[in-house]
Image: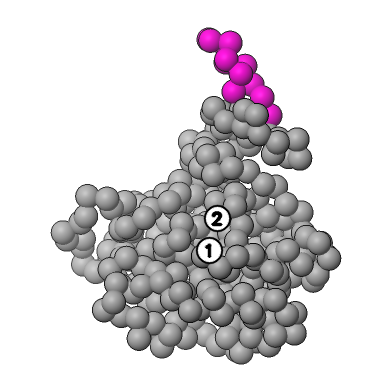
Amino acid sequence: MAKFQSLKDAVAENLNDGDIVAFEGFTHLIPHAAAHEAIRQDRKNLTLVRMTPDVVYDQMIGMGMVDKIIFSYAGNPGVGLLRRMRDAIENNWPKALEIEEHSHAAMANAYEAGAAGLPCAVFRGYKGAGLKDVNDNIREITCPFTGEKLAAVPSVRPDVTFIHAQKANKRGDILIEGIIGVQKEAVLAAKRAVVTVEEVVDDFEDVHVNACILPRWAVSSVCVVEGGAHPSYAHGYYVRDNAAYVEWDKIASDRTLFREWMQINVLDVDENIFVARINTLKGAA
């Protein structure tokens, strides 16, 4: 059952060295604050999972926290490369990085299989694709009913999933509005789930038809972190900080500049820094 606590305490209690961990969000509601707290707590030897890793995973990889990444499409959206991820893969800096690359369809199905408690996901896909030639976890299975050849990948079952959402009610249920991505499946597939939210309300009113409500029994911890998705956006609260993504390309291109930026903007700050950073964005969503 969900309990309300600080983000610092939630990360300390739920994220361990060596965990398989997902910080999920799909262009929207990306849990930057939670990932930054994990960086401050110096977690090590993580396996990161995400459907579309972007800037925040670049930061975690560059800080030497990550042994392996399981993903589909990696990049700085609208800008280009993840330069810290590329440096780790090509040059082993700051350490070697193992990669397991999939398609979006495979990742979505793998999360759904994990949420259902299944060992693998079976779907139509990868026919004629070369990715299976470099990823041993893409297999083929024959349907016992039709004889059709189908793709199979291991289910994704994180030790802990972190997501950001708009609201929690006082019972600990979570409301997500806007683009949902695979946050629901990532939470249900995980052993533990930490949700940062913009605010806590008595109950949910005027819920949009495209909303998702996660029940409190699926959530371990709820943390109020206003602006916790910045520089991504939170539908109804603030817009995407496009300038921050453009800036990141320059920062991440140089190892020294990257380390200096992380020290000033992540290591030397607390979770409340996000409040100040989004003040100029409020009201523009």
What span is colored magenta in the figure? 139-150
Q: Nearer the viewer, mark 2 or mark 1?
A: 1
Residue at 64% x, 65% y is: 81
Position of residue 244 measured from the top left corner of the image (x, y, whole percent): 51, 78
How many numbered marks appear?
2
Which residue reaches farthest left? 206
Give whichever of 163, 57 is nearer the camera.
57
Secondary element under disc 1, as helix, strand or loop, is loop
Image quarter (top left, top right, bottom left or bottom right) of the N terminus: bottom left
Residue at 63% x, 43% y is: 102
Type of amino acid at the residue the image marks with label 2: Thr
Q: CA distance from mark 2 to mark 1?
A: 9 Å
Give whichever of 253, 206 is nearer the camera.
253
Residue 77, label in figure? 1
Q: Is residue 274 magenta?
A: no
Residue 144, label in figure? none
- 157 vs 278, left or right, is right
Residue at 49% x, 49% y is: 186
Q: Is residue 68 visible?
A: yes
Q: Is residue 195 visible?
A: no
Residue 52, label in figure? 2
Type of amino acid at the residue the image marks with label 1: Pro
- 162 vs 95, left or right, is left
Secondary element under disc 2, as helix, strand or loop, is loop
Position of residue 196 measured from the top left corner of the image (x, y, whole percent): 42, 68
The crowd level at tag 2 (other Cα within 10 Å; few <14, some 14-19, many 20+) is: many
Position of residue 181 measured from the top left corner of the image (x, y, whole percent): 43, 51
Image quarter (top left, top right, bottom left or bottom right) of the C terminus: bottom left
Colour scheme: one colour
Q: Are marks 2 and 1 in contact (CB under 8 Å)?
A: yes
